[in-house]
Amino acid sequence: MMDKLNNKKTKLYMNILLIALFAAIIILLDTDTIGDNYIRRVLNLSAIYTIVSLSMNLVNGFTGLFSLGQAGFMAIGAYTVAIFTVPLAERAKIFYVVPQNPVLAQIELPFAIALVLGGLLAALIAVLIGMPVLRLKSDYLAIATLGFSEIIRIILTNAKSISNGALGIKGIPQMPTMWVFFGVAILSVVLIWLLIDSSYGRAFKAIREDEIAAEAMGISLFKHKVMSFAIGAFFAGIGGGLLASLLATVDPKQFYFTVTYNFLLIIVLGGMGSISGTVIASFVVTAGLEVLRFFDDPLTLFGVTIPIFRPGFRMVIFSLLLMLLVLFFRNGLLGQKELSWNLIFDWFKRKSKRTGKGGTAQ
Amino acid sequence: MSILKINNVTMQFGGVTAVNNLNIEVQEGKIEALIGPNGAGKTTAFNVITGVYSPTKGNVIYKDENITGLTPDKITKKGIARTFQNIRLFKNLTVLDNILIANHLRLNSNFLSCTLRLPWSNREERQMREKSEMLLDKLGLLGLKNETAHSLPYGEQRKLEIARALATDAKLLLLDEPAAGMNPSETMELSSFIHTIRDEFNLTIFMIEHHMDLVMEISEKIYVLDFGQLIAKGSANEVKNNQRVIEAYLGVEEDA
């Protein structure tokens, strides 16, 4: 039976079936047939997390650069969308403490353009930051990028005529359909996959495997590190822009450096250097964080209120899971492998062999 | 004609002089060797040639061009490739990927056209694969192309590292102890392998080696380094009978 499944045509049919199933689910969820606003929101958030996690995996998992600046790049994308898509008529109402910069106050862009602009801006800043910072290695790079992400947040808190400071920007137009989020997410996955599968992707992996050897093989470390960092920032910016539209509001607190750790958890869980692992982990973790909300609510068992169940406990559980993961499950779900039918078949084969010893003996 | 000239190169690390006023001329098309006791500065000399270090004094000329101070990737682009004393393959990648990566430096398409799979970059990718498979075929590694590099036997890993260096279209190949850790029969095989690739790819080979049998057999010229200083140069016989070389090796190191 497994061997029968294990041919090209079957795989093709199964892929088509899977895509159709996926599309059908989105279509059904998108209207109120089976979906509601809460589910849609969680799934849209998962799609956004997929994009940002992938961007982080490109830099951390595929190029081997320990960068923790994702929140900063997201903020750039989110604020670009926020600043340029809020209707002109409502600007004065939002910027009531400090008036908006007179040039920006006259520009309104369609969502798609603002989104791409946000990505490009994040990439540009990544190039500028990357040129000095990417000379650093491992922990030092992590600290520098973390610092950068904080700098962005602090600038956004203080550049009131541009970002409206700590008040944030409200009233960002929301996208009416899940397809915007899922469409961009699918496009991002495909583009990153194509990049990884190209000669440049191989060069990134070479840098991850052995910098000295990569350089000796003629790969310019500087050029490729900056490239990977900037492409990563581009997609993080896109993710941030989508987030702004999903939440309809941005403020600097959303881009606290702790946000980056969510993505770090996702890529470690999914597998550093696995695209499909990242996609799966993005959905599992985002949905999981929602499920864990149960820990944030007070819990009364048999009339006794358990004291540790209070807001914030969710994050303790979350951190605990991260520790367990790193201790016992270091390669994550898929390691550097990609999910494929072959992988699934092999897994089932091994499984059935193991249980099959007693089970299928006739 | 000399393909590589090392002129008065001195390399100091703080107060330590690893290489002192070194002069070497490697002749095009020859197999030449750099030998010396442990810690003599051989690998440092290689690192200066390949741009890992920039020399304290002196310069390195490759094909009449001063390459001193260039970064390693630029030097590789000019046609010098190397292997490492302790094998540095891209361990978790396949044999074919290792070779393909070494082709990346000749790629003309930018990352956008590669990502979008535009026709010209597809053509380049196809040519790259054909060229890599041809190289693997020539070196007898084609059957292993889908194996991960670290799963190969030791000798094959050494071979793959040389293949990877060749894939950069190098004209001058620097081998840092290619026979390290090999048994006598593997060493003999390596010796003929080095001859074959030199002739097949019109290479110049400059190597560091400890196996004296191998060095004496294949090198057309030998340079002997001791404490950063060049103490002798010449053919195998000249070097073998040189009093200073004998002194440098006696009691200091004995190859089993």
Image (cartoon, rainbow, N blue to C red):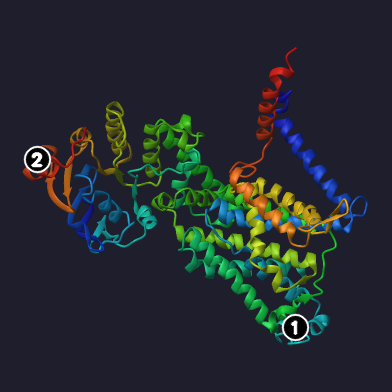
- In x, y percent, where is residue A234? 63, 63
Residue that mark 2 sits on: B238
Q: Residue at x 60, y 69 (%)?
A: A149
**Residue that protrudes farthest toward the right in the picture:** A33
In this view of the protein, which residue sits in the foreground, A291 or A184? A291
Give the quadrant of residue B155: top left
Dot 2 surroundings within 10 Å: few (below 14), some, or many (20 or more)? Answer: few
Residue A125 visible within the image: no
Measured in 3D between alpha carbons, the distance from the residue under mark 1 to the one under mark 2, in whole angstroms, is 84 Å
Classify A190 as above or below B70.
above
The amino acid type found where label 2 is placed reads Glu
> Which quadrant of the figure contains the C terminus of chain A?
top right
Residue B73 sits in quarter = bottom left
Query: Does the residue at mark 1 contact the one at mark 2 (Cβ under 8 Å)?
Result: no
Question: Circle 1: is it few (<14), some (14-19), or many (20+) Cα within 10 Å?
Answer: few
Q: Percent position (x, y) of residue B105?
A: 44, 52
Give SS at disc 1.
Answer: helix
Viewer-nearest of discs 1 and 2: 2
Amino acid type, label 1: Gln
Find disc 1 in the rendering and name its residue: A106
